[in-house]
Image: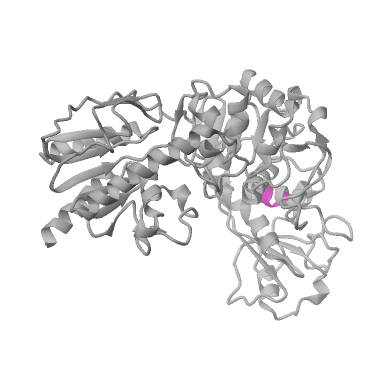
Amino acid sequence: MKIIRLIPLLTGLLFALPLVAANDQSAPAKVLILLAERFNVQEYYGGWVPLTALGYNIDVAGIETGTVHANPDRPSERDTEANISLEQVNPDDYIGLFIPGGYSPGNLEKHVKALEIVETFMKAGKPVAAVCHGPRLLMRTGTLKDRNFTCLFSLPNEIADLWISKPFGNYLDQNVVIDRNLVTSRYPNDMAAFSIAMAQAFERAGGTPVKLPEAPVVIIEQETTPHRRWFYSQLRTLGMTVQTYDLSSNIAEPIENAIVLVNLDTALLQPESILMQIIDASAVLFSPGGWQPPEYAGRIGGETDLEDAINIAALYSTAINSGTTTIPPPLQDTPTPAAVQLPETAFEPDGEYAAILALREGFDEQAAVTWLTSFEQLAVSPVLIVGPQAGTVEGMNRGSAITHAAYTDDIRLAAGALIAAPGGLWPEDDERARQRDDVEWLREQGKRDIVREEWLIHAHQNGAVLFLTGFDALRLGRRAEFSGMQFAAPEQTMWSFGRNGGRYHRDGSATRSGERIFSCRNYAIEPAVELWRKAVQEQ
């Protein structure tokens, strides 16, 4: 067995508990997390782990102190603890605020104190990071006014009246949107980018400098669970490769020069096992369980396992000091989309149209303009802009269009007419929407949406070509008529197609979904057009 290296570093690092970020001997800055029952596990731990690794002192504020259940019907190791209540929070004590999603924000917004906390942070210009359903707390306080932001696409369906009152600047379907002190993201798969942006925002406010270490980490436990393996793997948001094994693991070969944490009774380790070879090949060894043979002078702590928070901070701090690190690009505000007003197109009842821009309330203005430009470049004319009614149709981000034709009009289409549905967000009548504010007008909106969808399907059945863009790829794609087809809808909709309609397309930003049906993510319009060109050439 080789002698473990970097022992002086390890000893100095780990006996100076509580751990703080590398090279920072000051008291750790404090971060506040607002949390209530039915929080999203991936979003909570996906933010908590990197913040803990960076050495922040974290307070989890619940409606009351004690256990906060991810699912009250099934208590599990995924649950966490609120160490303070909302009433005990003093915003002056913290440099930043983190709001995970799930049902948690909807439960928190019922409490005036939670809204007051959010409003205080925003008005003070302190960094606020909210993911998924988290921004509904910001909407309730009116602090998204004139702000760029993002959230889960289903949020408009849950807070319909609030959404259409436009208590925000612009909605952007991006993995991270940064607007001064505000960082927002959409759903769990955004957590890697979100966590780094959140940490950088806290750094900008005087918190820990963000470094991304490349050192591999191996954690060996007597027995582990999927949650435990996943829990430690959240260090990947800081660029770290983490692998967790237990005594039953089947490992092909040892990992060289890893930082190894052994969290078990090491008498159980077989001398010639692969796990033992990993320990032998380690660059730094942690053994919090009391193991202390002479050749491994890395014993720390007492006879019981260390707390997860200390383990995580130790792994990150050691990786910073013992390996190669990179610094993420400077935090920059997300550009504000340009204001868009679509040109009018007059409706001639006796005319025959070669292209249609098919709008609904809340259409995506940027995609709509790009489609009009594409039609012009393709020399396809005349073009007609159609809406749910003749008159003004509001866009997603304060743009608008004047339409002179509705889906109930008798619109004549040329053979092989091109029809573009540009996507966008506006409340829909969706019974699956969680914590929904049920309003009467939403059912009327649902009827208008069905009229539009039926018109699009009828036009396709009569020979038209459909280009389904952004969220329209989901709206049409999940209908039973398109069962078995794949649709290139926005990434955050990957779990939203259901069982009766089409499926989410994972491979590429655009696809040929079916005969004369092409779909693309929000602005991948050029690839969709190229797929259509290719299909025409193959005929």
Query: On the picture, is 149 further left or further right than 291?
Result: left
Please tell me whether residue 189 belongs to the stretch shown in magenta: no
> At x 29% / y 56%, what residue is drawn?
511
Residue 501 visible within the image: yes
Picture coordinates of residue 474 (x, y %)?
A: 40, 49
Look at the image and name its color scheme. one colour
> At x 35% / y 59%, what residue is drawn?
482
Between residue 506 and residue 127, name the one nearer to us.
Answer: 506
The stretch in magenta equals 314-318
Between residue 169 and residue 219, name the one nearer to us.
Answer: 169
Picture coordinates of residue 1 (x, y %)?
A: 71, 73
Q: Main secondary structure of the magenta part?
A: helix
Between residue 182 and residue 3, name the one nearer to us.
Answer: 182
> At x 36% / y 55%, what residue is drawn?
487
Please identify the residue farthest to the top as the structure is shown: 123
Picture coordinates of residue 396 (x, y %)?
A: 40, 31
Query: On the picture, is 509 further left or further right than 269?
Result: left
The quarter of the picture where the C terminus appears is bottom left
Count of labels in the image = 0
Picture coordinates of residue 496 (x, y %)?
A: 48, 53
* Residue 84 vertical position relative to residue 306 in the rendered view, above or below: above
Please tell me whether residue 315 belongs to the stretch shown in magenta: yes
Query: On the picture, is 281 further left or further right than 12?
Result: left
Residue 327 visible within the image: no
> At x 28% / y 38%, what residue is drawn?
407
* Residue 511 vertical position relative to residue 97 in the rendered view, above or below: below
